[in-house]
Image (cartoon, rainbow, N blue to C red):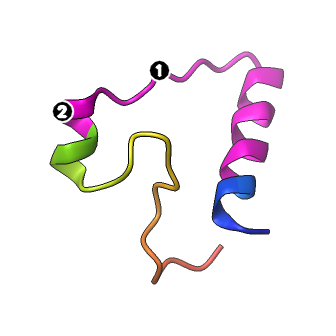
Amino acid sequence: LPKHLDEKVARLHLKKVGAMLSELSDEQAAYIGVPKQGPYKPDTYRY
C-alpha cells in the first residue's frame, strides 16, 4: 500500500480498538519535519 493509505488503515484500526489519536499541531509537525496531514514515515522506511 502507499504510505498514505497504510496510515489511513492504521487510523481506522486504532479507532476500531478504541484508541484515540490527536492531530499534530503545526508546531509539532514542523519540529519533527513531517507534513501535518502525513505521511509520517520517511521515504527510507519500508512498511
Q: Position of residue 17 (x, y in %)?
A: 79, 23
Q: Is residue 20 above or below residue 43?
A: above
Type of the residue with mark 1? Ser
Q: Is residue 20 above or below residue 36?
A: above
Identify the residue at horizontal 44%, vertical 25% (top origin): 23
Identify the residue at horizontal 30%, vertical 26% (top origin): 25
Q: Which residues are magenta?
A: 7-28
Does label 2 or label 1 sit earlier along the sequence? 1
What count of labels does the image hold?
Answer: 2
Type of the residue with mark 2? Glu
Residue 18 is covered by the magenta coloring: yes
CA gap between label 2 and label 1 equals 14 Å
Q: Position of residue 37 (x, y in %)?
A: 49, 41
Secondary structure type for disc 2 = helix
Secondary structure type for disc 1 = loop
Q: Is residue 34 above or below residue 18?
A: below
Identify the residue at horizontal 23%, vertical 36% (top origin): 28
Q: Left or right: 24 with respect to 29?
A: right
Q: Quadrant of residue 36?
A: top left
Q: Left or right: 35 with respect to 11?
A: left
Q: Quadrant of residue 34?
A: bottom left
Which quadrant holds the N terminus?
Answer: bottom right
Q: Position of residue 9 (x, y in %)?
A: 79, 45
Q: Which residue is mark 2?
A: 27
Q: Which residue is mark 1?
A: 22
Residue 46 is covered by the magenta coloring: no
Q: In the current view of this chain or complex, which residue is farthest to the bottom?
A: 44
Q: Position of residue 24 (x, y in %)?
A: 37, 30
